Amino acid sequence: MEVKDFILASSSPQRRKLLEQIGYKPKAIEAADIDESERRDEAPSAYVKRMAVEKARRVWSQHQGEVVLACDTIVVAGRRLLHKASNDAEQTKVMQLLSGKSHHVLSAVCVINKDGRESVRLSSSRILMKKLSEAEISAYVASREWVGCSGYKIEGCMEAFVRKIIGSYSGVVGLPLYETKNLLNGVGIK
């Protein structure tokens, strides 16, 4: 696979795999260390777009003149943003909250071109979850697949609990490929 002329501002193996699916291999990978705190009264869509932009800006500031791609993905139940659980008890509460209901996964993609111009796109997917038994919740929590993710990781045993996805599966995984490819094409990376 040919290396493409952009830097991926993420250390996520899922994002690398998704890019490779469409023939894109970044020339460099550099995770952006930023403050991911929510702002008071910030809407989830504004938050996820701001995170993608801030990640891209952080990496671009260290590699000016390069194309930088960044993404952020969050799970939203109502207006509540689900952050990464830090232990089994927190993840159990997340699973109980999502059980039998629908929720949204928002993925924002930001590309900064060589001149520093920013372009951002938002992908919103609605997920309908089956009603989970206590045993199913316990098994998922014990799988540890959720570690490091906002809400859950859909690729794996969680996928068996999803009744329907209305939107982008790749966006739920962590990088909406339609938006990503169009943004990269827009800055000359084919």
Image (tube, grey):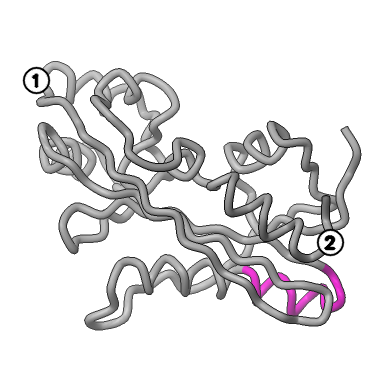
Q: Is residue 61 magenta?
A: yes
Residue of label 2: 188
Q: What element does badge 1 sit on?
A: loop
Q: Are marks 1 and 2 in contact (CB under 8 Å)?
A: no
Question: As rendered, which of 87 and 7 lies closer to the eye?
Answer: 7
Question: As rendered, which of 60 and 43 lies closer to the eye?
Answer: 43
Marker disc for residue 81: none
What residue range appears in magenta?
56-66
Q: Position of residue 77 (x, y in %)?
A: 19, 52
Q: Assign the magenta stretch its main secondary structure.
A: helix
- Tell me how far mark 1 sits from mark 2, CA to CA: 49 Å
Residue located 62% across and 72% down the image: 119
Amino acid type, residue under disc 1 in the picture: Ser
Question: As rendered, which of 167 and 99 lies closer to the eye?
Answer: 167
Of badges 1 and 2, the one in the foreground is 2
| Figure check: 173 above or below 68 | above
